[in-house]
Amino acid sequence: MVKPREVTDAEFEGEVLKAEVPVLVDFWAPWCGPCRMVAPIVEELADEYGGKVKFVKLNTDDNFNTAASYGIRSIPTLIVFKGGQPVGQIIGFRPKGDLKRVIDQALSA
């Protein structure tokens, strides 16, 4: 099982915005129950899309600046970035199929 890499405010530009492939960012916090529910789904997707999509997690408690700059008000929020731009977003716990749809749309865009 591929674990999404934890990124910080300082690493966000290099790891996400300048990435060669689309990146799914899981904005989360340790105290968030729905975040813990979505985490295993994100790990499954990281396995399925290995190499085609990069998966990272950003702890919104520790990395407030990045979360604020993307208007994250509810967690979990998952945003797909492509070419440094957000191209898909899901807020709250959603089934795996919904996440796959957003990722697939980003890949085909």
Image (cartoon, helix red, strand yellow):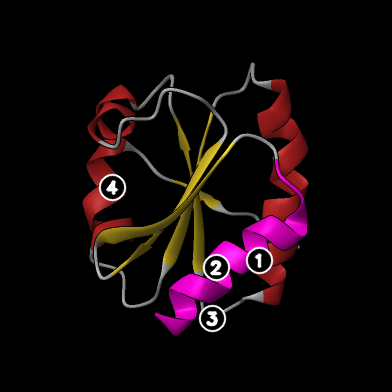
Q: Main secondary structure of the magenta part?
A: helix
Q: Residue 69 location in percent, x, y?
A: 23, 33
- Name the element at disc 3: loop
Tell me the number on the disc at residue 51: 3
Query: Residue 46, image x and y in percent?
Result: 64, 65
Q: Which mark is residue 24?
A: none
- SS of the residue under disc 2: helix
Q: Disc 1 vs disc 3: which is toward the camera?
A: 1
On screen, residue 86 versus residue 44, left or right, reads left
- SS at mark 4 in the image: helix
User: Distance between the Cα atoms at labels 2 and 3?
Assistant: 13 Å
Magenta residues span 94-109
Of marks 4 and 2, which one's residue comes earlier in the chain? 4
Residue assigned mark 2? 103
Question: Quick one: 92 or 83, which is closer to the camera?
Answer: 92
Q: Nearer the viewer, mark 4 or mark 1?
A: 1
Residue 76 vs 56, above or below: the answer is: above
Residue wearing tag 1? 100
Quadrant in which the C terminus appears: bottom left
Q: Nearer the viewer, residue 80 or 12?
A: 80
Q: Which residue is mark 4?
A: 11
Q: Which residue is at 74% across, 62% downward? A: 97
| Gap between marks 4 and 2 measured at Cα | 22 Å
Count of numbered tags: 4
Provide residue 36's location: percent of width, then percent of height: 72, 32
The amino acid beneath tag 1 is Lys
Residue at left offset 62%, top offset 76%: 49
Examine the rendered structure and indicate whether residue 48 appears above or below residue 77: below
Is the C-beta separation of discs 3 and 4 under 8 Å?
no
State if disc 2 and disc 4 touch (CB < 8 Å). Answer: no
In this view, the mark in front (3 or 4): 3
